[in-house]
Image (cartoon, rainbow, N blue to C red):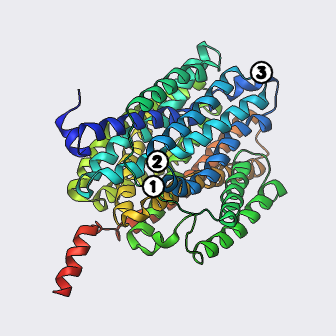
Amino acid sequence: MMSRGNEGTFGSRDNFLLVMIMILGVFVAILNETLLNVALTKIMDDFGIFPGTAQWLTTGYLLVIGVLIPVTAYLIQRFTTRSLFLGAMGLFTIGTFVAAIAPGIEWLIIGRLFQAAGTGLLFPLLTNVVFSIVPIEKRGSAMGTIGIVITFAPAIGPTLSGVIVEHFSWRVLFYGVLPIALIVIIFSYMKLKNVTETTNPKIDPLSLLLSTLGFGGIVYGFSSSGEGNGGWSSNEVLFPIAIGVVSLILFTWRQLTISQPLLDLRTFKYRIFRLSTLIMMIVMMAMFSAMMLLPIFLQNALGYSPLEAGLVMLPGGIVMGIMSPITGRLFDKFGAKWLALIGLGLVAITLWQFAFITLSTPYSTIMIFNTLLMLGISMVMMPVMTNALNELPPALYPHGTAIISTLQQVAGAVGTALLVSIMTNRSTRFIENHLMMENAAELKILAMIAGMKTAFLFGFGLVVTAWIVSVFIKRPISQEQRLKIKQGATN
């Protein structure tokens, strides 16, 4: 049964049903993003492939999302809510089916690319729908409800994957998601209604090309470095990043000089939107640092199994799921500033603690630190995003959502690459400085600890920067209040 509080938040029972249908679709899509992380070894064994090939399951996924999300602003304005959601879920379901029955790695990669195409559309669409139907004073609670799936799904992905892969084939990861996706499609076909206004915007082919080269090049280049496909000096890393940077410069110029931009960069004229977007990018880097580095340390240094490494993330995911609606209500009452200051302070403290973990640090202590880290992130992510979008006029909601979603993906790829690179370089230098040690295995573990310390200290520095920035954010004035102020000045 739907509570009166939920009905009040979303305006009506129909609106609540609409959002719940979309949330279920987004949940399975985002859960799918992290499901394969633990299963890559089994997939490599089954298909007889090397890590460089298997990593395309991750790199290709990120690449499609990075390329597609900037186009969502155009798609949201061009197509109805119902048709776009059904199209996105259709792509995701087709990809899931292809991946489940894939006879070889090529078909598995193709399936993942279709999944990514659907996933890239779903979250910006859901966010835009919420901002279209929920009044500004209740958006924190609404976005807190969405935050349950956005934060909980990727956190439980590694744990769920570890349980399944340890007892069943990796194909169960796709077969398990498939019926849920089909149920969402059937239910949305019967119940989903249109809530956003459609227009007939023109798409600029040059903007589309520059966006694809820009975001795609940066995501691919940094992902290649982060996955160990080449050092920072290799052509496989530098060439895509160079193309991406030049293309983004041209893309920015193009968006500021045409009448109907693909991404309306006027959103950055709004101060709170600028500051909030920067904070969110840094938080994404911090979250990815923990999700990437902790399992590596637990498995390679402490000798834990993939399942045990995944279980470290589970309490944090549960806490994020519980806290998301609570922080949403706190945002509606107090605004984003104090939530961000407290949350980022907690994130900074836990990253500092991670920098000094050793071989004697208990498993439970690492789990507690990670849970506190996720608690801090839950206090920042959705409130700061909601605060950023609240400052924009309704016409810019699709563009603001697309920009934030795109930059989050870019920040995730860049952050992962930087932190892995920092850890690797520091570990290498440690080994070079301690070549006299006779125990090679011990040397390797100590080098990893030294590398993780440097990486987490770098993350700590980034979060401190975000904490300083959060001092300057405030609750934006709503469009209704601005109109009253203008009318009062006129009178």
Which circle marks residue 424 in the picture? none
Apparent side of residue 112 relative to residue 329 in the rendered image (left or right): right
Res. 308 visible in picture: yes
* Residue depicted at x 38% and y 66%: 392
Position of the N terminus, as image quadrant, is: top left
Q: Name the residue tied to disc 3.
A: 103
Note whether residue 430 is visible.
Answer: no
> Which amino acid is tagged 3?
Pro
Identify which amino acid the numbered label 1 is placed on.
Thr
Q: Can you give x and y, in whole percent of width and height, for residue 401 in the image?
A: 46, 56
Tag 2 residue: 80
Counting residues from the start of the chain, the first of labels 2 and 1 encountered is 2
Q: Nearer the viewer, mark 3 or mark 1?
A: 1
Question: Disc 2 residue type?
Answer: Thr
Left or right of 271 on screen, residue 253: right
Q: Circle 1 sits on which residue?
A: 198
